[in-house]
Amino acid sequence: MKEKYVRTKRLHLAANLLVGMALLAGGLLLDLVDNSRALIGLSLIPFGYALGLLINLILIKRNPQGMNPLIIAENDERVMSVRNEADSVTFRGLRWALTLVFLGYTFLVPGDIFEAVGWWITFGFLFAAYMVQGIVFALNYGKQA
């Protein structure tokens, strides 16, 4: 089980480093042309996650027996069930907050309806938040059937 855990963490580490380098390269190229530093800032997110994974892998290599409780806790079905329930509650809360933001924006600035980019972006996120739940459920239910 530990080998699978380490292999998965290494894959996540490589993927995050690749995404971080792509964002950093894109940000540096755009910074030469447009003085836009948003992509450079966004590249810090996958680099930070990759750093955390690297530290985790180093700790596993130095003290494999001490990391067994962590590995078991991340793979235990009971803990995963509680984590999934917490994620579900968080997702529902964020979806309700997004609904309130969308309704507040629509009612406070009625001139922007169907015209402003911000209204369409907010509407797109709200629509996606409700659609993703059904799509993920259908994909998971299709695997079990």
Image (spheres, grey):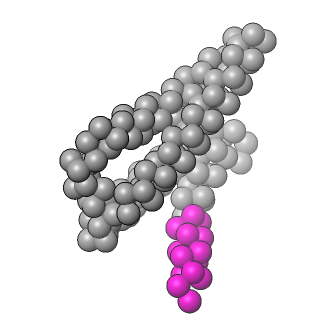
4 above or below 67? below
Q: Which residues are magenta?
A: 131-145
Q: Main secondary structure of the magenta part?
A: helix
Q: What's the residue at 28%, 47% (across, down)?
A: 64
Q: What's the residue at 32%, 43% (across, down)?
A: 60
Residue 55 x, y percent position in the rendering: 36, 34
Residue 70 x, y percent position in the rendering: 26, 53
Relative to residue 67, is residue 130 drawn left or right?
right
User: In the rendered view of the protein, which quadrant contains the C terminus?
Assistant: bottom right
22 above or below 31? below
Q: What's the residue at 25%, 42% (across, down)?
A: 63
Depth order, front residue of 57/136: 57
123 above or below 61? below
19 above or below 92? above
Q: Which residue occupies the extreme right position in the image?
A: 33
Residue 77 x, y percent position in the rendering: 31, 71
Say if residue 110 shows up in the picture. Answer: no
Residue 101 x, y percent position in the rendering: 47, 46
Q: What's the residue at 64%, 52% (across, down)?
A: 124
User: In the rendered view of the protein, which quadrant contains the N terminus?
Assistant: bottom left
Say if residue 133 shows up in the picture. Answer: yes
Depth order, front residue of 87/16: 16
Relative to residue 72, is residue 130 drawn left or right?
right
Depth order, front residue of 66/139: 66
* Count of numbered labels shown in the rendering: 0
Q: Does the magenta-highlighted stretch encompass residue 28?
A: no
Q: Quadrant of residue 14?
A: top right
Relative to residue 23, is residue 133 drawn left or right?
left
Q: Quadrant of residue 142?
A: bottom right
